[in-house]
Image (cartoon, grey):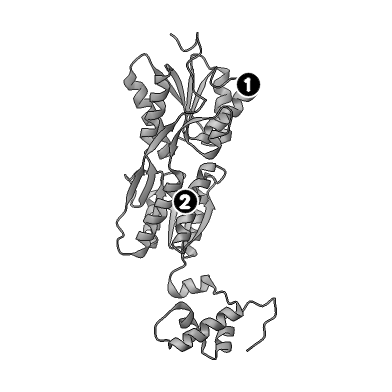
Amino acid sequence: MPTLTKQEAPTLRDVAAAAGVTIATASRSLTGAYGVHPETRKRVMETATLLNYKPNRSARALVTGHSNVIGLVVSDVRNPYFAEVARGAEDAAYAAGFDLLLCNSDLYADRQMRYINSLLEKRVEGIIMNSVANLSRKDQTFIVDSGVPVVLLYQSAGGTPFSTVSADSERGGELAAEYLLAHGHRHMMYLAGSRQHANLSKRAQGFLQVVRRFGHKAEAGVMYGTHTLAGGYEIARSLFRKLGNTTAIATANDVIAFGVIKAAIELGVNIPRDVSLIGFDDVELASIVHPPLTTIRQSKYEIGGAAVDILLRLAAGKDRSPEHRVLGVELVERASVGAPPSGRGKR
């Protein structure tokens, strides 16, 4: 048996030589291919274990066409929401014998497409993507023609050839408005994040629909910006300087709400005494900020797992028809919403 130094990683050629077989036979033995005598396969497997041989997965993917790798493209890895989604996806992938490769588009559409190209070059089995913007028809055609299945997160079924997994964003927006109205708020502001983000827009749409149905006694304005902590902070600083009759703020995600809390602390605005605040997502930090954040909970871990479940079905090739799953939402009551301050919020 050839002797290897500590610096040398054993190759398939080393395994074949040590087992006394050809490289082709060693490869077929290790991959479980047919046509290898059981005793020969056993000898090759034992030799590979003895040499601590690790197969080159990239090279193997070129031969078999299967990498057992799934790509996950998120828009902002700093958002704790995506940590929980990624954990759900990673656990589901691991249970199925797949690896998960995480990519961060950092809210840039061009960076997003660069990662998609890179993942396709790596021959991933499929891609889960939190798209930062609606994919162009050209990009959609390119991805469809690649033959690699895609599951989009937080996008409705309409207007896309891909499968989707999302929470019921519109209903979540409705719950937030209903809760604030029930607490007596009639002058509210919705911090919606980006205008181009379809999922966040649905949350704003649900919120505004409930306010309009309430009648002329209630009103809600909308402010746009980036759906990040910094975005929420900048919008809130501007809003707090001209708060007027506004007694409550709803945000399109919890991270925006954290930015609002940061601005409130700096400017001496008390939540909920001076203004109430409600978020959306229920990330882990929402329960430990001050005050603990009332928010709309969606099943983040389950969304990640559901996306992998759909992707594995599509990758198996038995049924390539798109699937669309919408998970429910619920309101989580904490301490950031109170009654409107006396003397404000009245006509």
- Quarter where residue 308 is shown: bottom left
Q: Is residue 53 above or below residue 83?
A: below
* Number of numbered labels in the structure image: 2
Q: Which amino acid, by three-letter code, is at mark 1?
A: Leu
Check the picture and name the quadrant holding the C terminus.
top left
Q: Secondary structure at mark 2?
A: helix
Asked if residue 226 shows in the view, the reply is no
Q: Percent position (x, y) of residue 55? A: 54, 74
Q: 10 Å neighbourhood of mark 1: few (<14), some, or many (≥20)?
A: few
Q: Nearer the viewer, mark 2 or mark 1?
A: 2
Check the picture and name the quadrant holding the N terminus.
bottom right
Asked if residue 124 shows in the view, the reply is yes
Q: Secondary structure at mark 1?
A: helix
Rendered image: mark on residue 88: 2
Q: 10 Å neighbourhood of mark 2: few (<14), some, or many (≥20)?
A: many
Question: Which residue sits at x=60%, y=77%?
Answer: 52
Question: Which residue sits at x=62%, y=24%?
Answer: 265
Horizontally, is 60 left or right of 152 in the view? right
Question: Which residue sits at x=56%, y=80%?
Answer: 48
Rendered image: mark on residue 201: none
Q: Percent position (x, y) of residue 6? A: 70, 77
Q: Percent position (x, y) of residue 112? A: 49, 51
Q: Percent position (x, y) of residue 273? A: 54, 17
Residue at the bottom extreme, as displayed: 20
Q: Which amino acid, by three-letter code, is at mark 2?
A: Gly
Q: Is residue 64 above or below residue 194?
A: below
Horizontally, is 100 left or right of 1 in the view? left
Question: Which residue sits at x=63%, y=19%?
Answer: 268
Q: Nearer the viewer, residue 274 or 267?
A: 274
- First in sequence, mark 2 or 1: give its number: 2
* CA separation in Å, label 2 and label 1: 38 Å
Rendered image: mark on residue 267: 1
